[in-house]
């Protein structure tokens, strides 16, 4: 064996030893670059790896100079946009150029070739990474100098590529398996959360039906029974007294008002007819009506128009959360001022219900069921609930935050309007 062959063998063995035990792309590539530099001095080296589950896309890891190609390690790019696309597609055996700046093979319409100029890369050498007879990526070596590499360097680079290809293939397959396992675990977690959420929502709907039944039985049915008896009594009189008829009319009006309240609590009609902000104002007025001392209310709205355009299920669910927060504030406060703000902040739609009544801990100890309902509703529309006390220990701020991306995604789903997320109370 010649001295030159011995040198090559030593370097190949050094590369093999250097990458042994390395478990991430950057560490592997750094070790390889250090050894390759003894054989082929370079200013930039990278590997392009075709994604196993997206054969039309690839990722890039680089050492030496930092270029825009390095961003492809985080954001995969289409193979069709790579300056060496023909190599990655298996249409050529290798690329060797004295000056990539003036080599039209690297420059075509939509080619991502800007780093060649930005990093001053002239001489370039590219060989494929083969596994199971298929191109799985490429080893790419570049220099600032012109005419740095030869056909002999191509052979050396290909031998190195054949040595490291199985290692990178194993790494990317392992990475894919980890991602699939994490995705499967996350999917199972979401399914379980949705199952529990649906169970709790079903329980909430059943409780709502029971509450409606009790309201009808305890109040409306009793009112109607009393009215029926009064009508029977009046029918036995030859000439009913005007005051009796007036009292009967008053009782009928009261009964109708009670029925209207039950219906409105079940289906927020103002929300559908006039929009989110008006529905919140109407809810505030209903909730504080007749409360003494008087509670001042206000609504600050800079973003409800976005809600008015989103699917009914999402809009109604958010309204139910706000409705619960308002009712809790009035019932357990009671505050002197109650406000609702609707705004967009940091790519989130935020709705805050703020009062100056008792603190958050005291209020929600008394209303744990209401808090659970709000959190379940929020989870089902990918929103979050935050409950904090105001400064000076008085009052509570309940904030529901919904990512703008979730609202836009919901707008694109035609079936969203047919869901039952907003049913129940």
Image: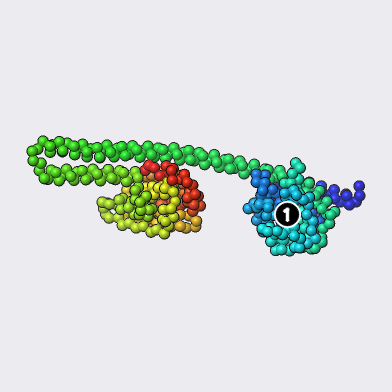
Q: Position of residue 39 (x, y in %)?
A: 82, 55
Q: Residue at x 15, y 36 (%)?
A: 232
Report the coloring of the rendering: rainbow
Q: Is residue 246 left or right of residue 292?
A: left
Q: Nearer the viewer, residue 211 or 358?
A: 211
Residue nearer the viewer, 191 or 108: 108
Residue 390, above or below 424: below
- Residue extending farthest left: 238
Residue 344 spot, x, y in % from top left: 46, 57
Give the quadrant of residue 244. Answer: top left
Which residue is disc 1 drawn over?
A: 84
Q: Position of residue 1 (x, y in %)?
A: 91, 47
Looking at the image, which residue is at 49% across and 57% down? Answer: 346
Quick one: label 1, few (<14), some, or many (20+) residues within 10 Å? Answer: many
Image check: 61 left or right of 336? right
Quadrant assignment, res 98: bottom right
Residue closer to the observer: 81 or 347: 81
Instruction: Tell which of 172 and 249 is nearer to you.
Output: 249
């Amino acid at each position: 064996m010649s001295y030159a062959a011995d040198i090559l063998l030593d370097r190949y063995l050094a590369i093999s030893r250097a990458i042994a035990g390395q478990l991430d792309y950057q560490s592997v590539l750094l070790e390889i670059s250090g050894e390759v530099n003894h054989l082929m001095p370079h200013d930039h080296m990278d590997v392009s790896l075709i994604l196993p589950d997206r054969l039309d896309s690839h990722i890039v890891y680089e050492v030496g100079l930092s270029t825009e190609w390095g961003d492809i390690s985080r954001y995969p790019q289409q193979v069709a946009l790579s300056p060496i696309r023909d190599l990655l597609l298996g249409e050529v055996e290798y690329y060797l150029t004295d000056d990539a700046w003036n080599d039209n093979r690297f420059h075509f319409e939509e080619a991502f070739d800007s780093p060649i100029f930005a990093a001053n890369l002239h001489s370039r050498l590219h060989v494929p990474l083969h596994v199971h007879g298929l191109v799985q990526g490429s080893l790419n070596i570049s220099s600032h100098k012109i005419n740095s590499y030869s056909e002999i360097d191509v052979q050396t680079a290909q031998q190195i590529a054949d040595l490291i290809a199985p290692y990178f293939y194993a790494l990317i397959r392992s990475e894919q398996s980890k991602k699939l396992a994490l995705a499967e675990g996350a999917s199972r977690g979401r399914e379980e959360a949705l199952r529990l959420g649906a169970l709790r929502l079903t329980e909430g709907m059943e409780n709502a039906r029971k509450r409606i039944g009790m309201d009808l039985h305890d109040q409306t049915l009793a009112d109607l029974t009393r009215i029926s008896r009064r009508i029977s009594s009046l029918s036995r009189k030859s000439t009913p007294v005007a005051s009796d008829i007036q009292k009967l009319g008053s009782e009928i009006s009261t009964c109708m008002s009670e029925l209207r309240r039950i219906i409105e609590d079940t289906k927020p009609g103002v929300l559908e007819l006039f929009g989110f902000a008006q529905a919140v104002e109407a809810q505030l007025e209903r909730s504080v009506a007749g409360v003494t001392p008087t509670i001042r209310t206000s609504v600050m709205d800079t973003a409800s128009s976005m809600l008015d355009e989103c699917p009914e299920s999402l809009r109604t669910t958010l309204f139910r959360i706000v409705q619960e927060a308002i009712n809790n504030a009035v019932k357990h406060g009671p505050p002197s001022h109650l406000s609702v703000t609707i705004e967009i902040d940091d790519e989130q739609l935020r709705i805050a219900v703020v009062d100056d009544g008792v603190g958050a801990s005291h209020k929600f100890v008394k209303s744990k069921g209401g808090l659970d309902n709000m959190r379940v509703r929020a989870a089902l529309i990918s929103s979050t609930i935050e409950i904090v006390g105001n400064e000076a220990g008085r009052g509570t701020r309940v904030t529901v935050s919904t990512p703008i991306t979730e609202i836009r995604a919901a707008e694109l789903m035609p079936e969203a309007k047919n869901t039952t997320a907003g049913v129940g109370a």
